[in-house]
Image (cartoon, coloured by chain):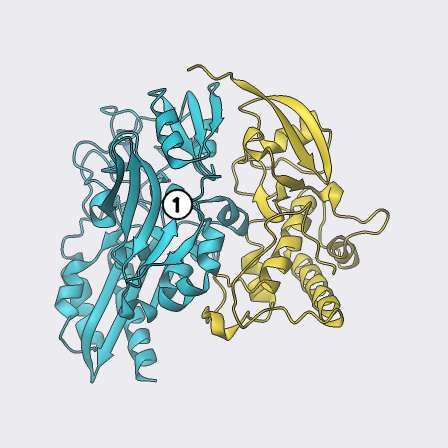
Amino acid sequence: MNPTKSSAISLRVNGETHSLTVDNRTTLLDALREHIDLTGTKKGCDQGQCGACTVLLDGRRANSCLQLAVAAEGRAVTTIEGMADGERLHPVQQAFLDFDGYQCGYCTPGQVCSAVAVIEEHAAGWPSAATADIRPETGPPPLDDNEIRERMSGNLCRCGAYVSIVRAVAEAAAQAAAVRESAGDTTPDGGSGSGTVPAGGSGARVTA
Amino acid sequence: MREFGYMRATDVTEAVSLLATDPEARFLGGGTNLVDLMKTGVENPALLIDVRELPLDRIEVADDGALKIGATVTNSDLAADPEVRRRYPALAQAVLAGASGQLRNMATVGGNLLQRTRCGYFGDTTQPCNKRVPGSGCPALTGEHHNHAILDWSEHCVATHPSDMGVALAAFDAVVSVHTADGPAELPLSEFYLPVGDTPHRETALPPGALITGVTLPAAPVAARSRYRKVRERASYAFANGSIAAALDVEDGTVRDVRLAFGAVASRPWRARKAEQALTGGPATPEAFAAAADAELAAARPLTHNGYKVPLIRNLVVAMLTELTQEDAR
């Protein structure tokens, strides 16, 4: 058996399907930037340590630099370009603007994608390493600064804008919780605590 | 990076037979370690068999109460699972202590067991390394080894196993399920990792061509009162300098059952059976905890720059068991 070293794949990005032929070595990050011209997703360390390349895969955050493009076929990819609703920024993007959650901006697309997912994960009842009591009956902890810092630790900011990033994530999370409450949704679900962050669809949205 | 073919397996039998088509084929799970090592030339497969979509993504309770965890369950789903959090909290804590949210979404249980050491010499193809190139030497012995092994290393390799998850699995007597061309088989985690000896490049007892299909945790009431603690050089998102998974059942001041395992001290997750034996049936006091830790660590052979790990692990044992005792009394 001698499978070819490149593959014709279709990638579903921000709801749009792209057909391309990639060398199997191509990461999702490079496919997005070099093949589909979506340069919002940034290459930092290229080894899964900095989080600049964070995108959503089937609604969950992932490091696109460690994701082979060929292995992403059939999965829904959401990049920073897919976050806004037309001209209206995603609430997390708006919060980063409102609270100056950046300096140079290079890590920001990854920070925003990660924060969108953090808010979803927390609302779904996922514990973190900062959670004192992880029993499902206890329900999710308040999304305080400690929780945000732990949950966002996969996104480095060399400018050190962390203080403002934490404020932006907290503000966006509070907004998302208010939206859920007004929609009559009782999550965070402390009852079952079974984290079921979206496993499909064209991308996670904080807004109801 | 070397060019490679890519195939996606849809069932376990197909995955195993596809792997057999090329001696240089490897399974691809979440890819968080393998793809990284391919970029640096440490791993050079000719063919990747993608097993991420195999139907092994369930966590189920068996009739005998055991918890069966599929090999493609992601770290995130494992740590969020209500049964895991209720019955084996140290396992959920261990998984949450590892990597980042992004990586935990990608990484799988099977891949976690097979991840490679983070020894800097192993990851640097310009350096000798007996694990990467057998017989080439071990610069870590006299070089940068502040986070290397203190237990059961050999002059051929002093690298540690980096997994947090594996430490909790070791404490809870996990059994690894595999599938080969001959069919399914089981391998206790205690026999899964091979001693370093003079073959540090041979890391596991997995049969050739075997696919990990899952991990089973036997029912263990003691595990419901368990914790994982990890010491590292920054607050989050770093490998351990030392870690511990501990479970404790105390009745009338006497230790009825105890489980202890250490991370970042050896080439494999380290089940502390000597300490457990020293404790079982004896008093649940800080003095007894310290004596048990000493019994386990008597075999420690620290290197020039990692002697701190001996008191670190000792202190972790005393602190964790003391906390669990106090929790037990409530």
Image-quadrant location for residue A146: bottom right
Look at the picture and state if B258 lies above or below A7.
below
Which color was chain B given?
A: cyan
- Which image quadrant is residue A58 in? top right
Q: Which chain is yellow?
A: A
A36 left or right of B122?
right
Question: Residue A139, how many percent across, how many down?
Answer: 53, 72
In front: A199, or A57?
A199
Q: Identify the element where label 1 is drawn.
A: loop
The residue that label 1 is drawn on is B71
User: Is B327 placed above or below B303 here?
Assistant: below
Relative depth, front residue between B274 and A6: A6
Q: Residue at x 67, y 60 (%)?
A: A169
Left or right, B242 with respect to B77, comes to left
Q: Is residue B160 visible?
A: no
Q: Position of residue B116 (x, y in %)?
A: 35, 38
Query: What residue do we see at 22% from left, 38% from top?
Result: B205
